[in-house]
Image (spheres, helix red, strand yellow):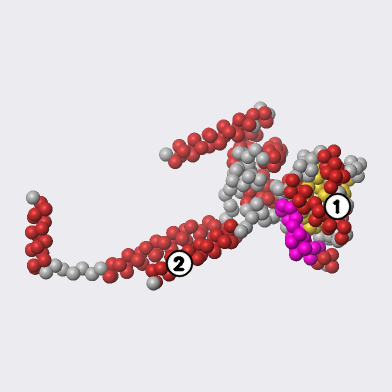
Amino acid sequence: MRRLFAALLLLLACSAVWAKEAAPLAEDPAVEKRLMVISEELRCLVCQNESLAGSRADLAQDLRREVRNLIKAGKSDAEIKEFMVSRYGDFVLYRPPLKPTTWLLWIGPFVLLLAAVGGLIAYLRRRGRQVTDTPLSAEESLRAEALLKESDK
Amino acid sequence: MKRFLIPLALFVVLVGFLAVGLNRDPREVPSPLVNKPAPAFTLEQLADPTKKFSPADLKGQVWMFNVWASWCVSCRQEHPLLVEFARARVAPLIGLDYKDTRTDGLRMLTMSGNPYDFSVFDADGRVGIDYGVYGVPETYVIDKAGVIRYKHIGPLTAQALEKTILPLINELKKS
């Protein structure tokens, strides 16, 4: 289900971009396809919640042109990303790299999860100790049986 | 009492995070270019296409590099501060006319005054990309060795100029 949703979303994103990128697309479909894949992973710095592929900002158009030229020059994906990061920092990457300054970002959620699970276990244990099992007296069990029989009818 | 203490503590922590987070400008992305050599380029000057400029020409001097354009509204906002800065003759001020036309750029300088020693003309924004420009105006302080020491994103403020940029320039000039 999630995969289908992702595929649909991608299709939607692609169609929107292809619609306005029609002219350069005619140039070289292979280059445009790689441009699409790479620029989906990069953030547009002008409208920060848009990818470079989806943005209409002037700078995004210029940067797509740069990426297109880099692709034509035979650069690898890693080299193209490095080109962007060396100018705009890790912020341009939608997937931040794993390094000391981003450890908290990557590991933080798991630390929170562990802390929450730990807290839950501690709480349940404490509660387990507080609720002690007191056996019913003979009189009480007779009453309980009577009540159960009554509800059976 | 204790059962209220924990939510209260969590709330205070949350407020703390929000107070810091909401007061930060999300448009200010820390530049990886600070403390790196200023990217090299050779561009024509705006007023005179026969004259060329590269950052290497100013080696040995502390200078300020300001990215502007005639179409940029907030450039007008910082313009008086630049004029003031130029009048004080603290350091050379070079402009980069970013994605503009020569006529519009020159008209803007005649109309509102020219604080720059000179401006260079970056018609297609290639040099802007090398400098990581994403929101004009942007201002760089470049030291004697040609290393970018400070980058200001968005219009300069009197506070940023007096508290950060001028002390930094004076410091760099001494070294």
Residue A37 in the image, given as x and y percentages of width and height: 59, 39
The disc labelled 1 sits on which kind of residue?
Answer: Pro
Q: Residue at x 76, y 59 (%)?
A: B158
Q: Earlier in the sequence, mark 2 or mark 1?
A: 2
Q: Check residue B129 for magenta coloring.
A: no
Q: Label 1: how many residues lie within 10 Å, few (<14), some (14-19) or many (20+)?
A: many
Residue A86 in the image, given as x and y percentages of width and height: 69, 51
Q: Nearer the viewer, residue A123 or B13?
A: B13
Q: Nearer the viewer, residue B156 or A7?
A: B156
Q: Residue at x 65, y 34 (%)?
A: A31
Q: Residue at x 46, y 38 (%)?
A: A5
Pointer 2 with pointer 1, Cβ within 8 A: no
Relative to residue A80, is residue B8 drawn left or right? left
Secondary structure under the numbered disc 1 in the rendered image:
loop
Q: Magenta region: which residues?
A: B147-169
Which residue is disc 2 drawn over? B8
- Residue A58 bears which disc, if any? none
Q: Cα distance, mark 2 to mark 1?
A: 54 Å
Which residue is disc 1 drawn over? B115
